[in-house]
Image (spheres, helix red, strand yellow):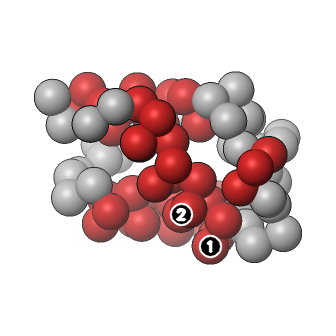
Amino acid sequence: MTKEEILNRTKAILAVIKPAVSQDSINFDTVLVRDLGLDSLSYLLMGLALEKEFDMKIADDARFTTVDDVCEYIQKSNS
């Protein structure tokens, strides 16, 4: 799976969690807290949705700052 494919699926998840944010405004450099306004509950929901979408487990100590961090983690986990 390419990083672009992961990005598109991640954008769809983020659009459900934060409906006020346009998918077009989300890219690899998007900062989850600053740009999307993710709080602790949104962050948790994102993690659960990513685990389901990509059929994987995210480590409890995993920390993501940007969308690129998320995509890199998923890509490494699925390789």
Figure check: 73 above or below 24? above
Position of the N terminus, as image quadrant, is top left
Disc 1 crowd, CA 10 A, few/some/many (<14, 14-19, 20+): few
Residue furthest left in the image: 79
- Whether residue 70 is visible to the viewer of this picture, yes or no, is yes
Figure check: 8 above or below 15? above
At 71% across and 55% down in the image, what residue appears?
23
Q: Considering the numbered disc 1 on the image, is that residue within a helix, a strand or a loop? A: helix
Write down the quadrant of residue 16 in the picture. Answer: bottom right
Write down the quadrant of residue 15 in the picture. Answer: bottom right
Provide residue 11's location: percent of width, then percent of height.
Answer: 58, 53
Q: Which residue is mark 1?
A: 16
Write down the quadrant of residue 52 in the picture. Answer: bottom left
Q: Considering the numbered disc 2 on the image, is that residue within a helix, a strand or a loop? A: helix
Q: Report whether 77 appears left or right of 61.
A: left
At 56% across and 62% down in the image, what residue appears?
12
Q: Report whether 64 appears left or right of 2.
A: right
- Whether residue 66 is visible to the viewer of this picture, yes or no, is no
Provide residue 37's location: percent of width, then percent of height.
Answer: 81, 54
Say which of 28 and 73 sits in front: 28
Q: Which residue is mark 2?
A: 13
Task: Give how far apart the Cα atoms at labels 1 and 2 are.
Answer: 5 Å
Q: What kind of residue is marked 1?
A: Val
At 32% across and 63% down in the image, what residue appears?
53
Q: What kind of residue is marked 2?
A: Ile
At 55% across and 28% down in the image, what residue appears?
68
Figure check: 60 above or below 76? below
* Mark carried by residue 34: none
Say which of 43 and 79 sits in front: 79
